[in-house]
Image (spheres, rainbow, N blue to C red):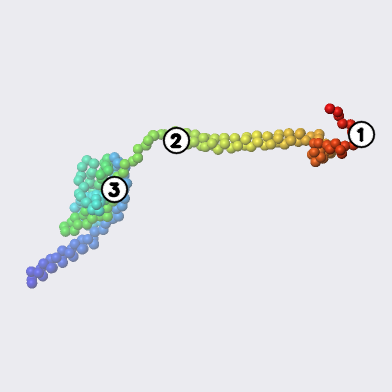
Amino acid sequence: MEFRLVIFLCFWEAVAKAKVEEEELKLEADEPYLRVAVDHNATVRCCYCWNKSPNITWIVNDPPINGTILPRLVNQSDNVIHRKIDETDGVKCHSLDFKSIQLNYTGLYQCKLSHGSLHTFTHGTFLLVYKPLQKTLNLSESVKNSIITAEGVLLLLCVLIPGTMLLCKSKTLNELNRKKGQEEENIYEGLNLDECNSAYHQIQRSNQQGPYQDVASCAEDIQLEKP
């Protein structure tokens, strides 16, 4: 019974001590997202306020594979350097410097603070490495401006030329209609309407009488031609 009590007290003391130490630790806000082009430099930081001097280990969480996140230690090399920044107003910061960053460096970077039995992770920064698009044509700004100006001139010509052609066509049609009206007026010019009416009536009467005359109905003084 006494042995169990001793174990319980030791455990409770350790938990209370860890809780006190955790309350004294204050994590500063990290940069949540960092986007960097490949072969460029980048720096990831983690900051905290703590009167202790914990052991700092950088952890990277690779993008999930089949829904599983794979954390791993960040190994220092010529391209990856871990350094400590001087303390300012009680805030301690550590940085992870990348030189000539590569695509496989993409992931969530966190600092692991270890002091005794206490292990705490900072909020972390997600580093996204991308590959810039290659330009098909490497044109200078002056060439681009010249191309834009030429496009504007061509667009203006495409609007003006069809409009001018339609105006010319409409003008030609109006002139033809005017000439046609003048010719019709010239046809009827100088005609006497009374003479036209009398000739019209004579033609109508001749059509009603027929092309032949009845010999019996002719006057007596009309002499028939002998064969």
Q: Amino acid at mark 3?
A: Leu
Residue picked out by circle 2: 144
Comparing marks 3 and 2, which lies closer to the viewer?
2
On the rendered structure, is 53 left or right of 6? Answer: right
Farthest bottom residue in view: 1
Q: Nearer the viewer, mark 1 or mark 3?
A: 1
- Residue sitting nearer the eye, 173 or 51: 173
Provide the residue designation for mark 1: 221
Determine whether the residue tagged by mark 3 lies in a helix, strand or loop.
strand
Q: Residues within 10 Å of mark 2 (few under 14, many from 20)?
A: few
User: Which x, y percent locates residue 211?
Assistant: 80, 36
Q: Which residue is mark 3?
A: 127
Label 2 sits on a secondary structure element that is helix
Residue lying farthest to the front in this orientation: 227
> Between residues 189 and 80, which one lies in front from this camera angle?
189
* Residue drawn at the location 47% of the way across and 36% of the way down: 148
The residue located at (19%, 55%) in the rendering is 114
- Percent from the top left, x then y, of residue 147? 46, 34
**Amino acid type indicated by mark 1:** Asp
Counting other residues with Cα less than 10 Å from the Cα at mark 3, is it few (<14), some (14-19), or many (20 or more)?
A: many
Disc 1 on helix, strand or loop?
loop
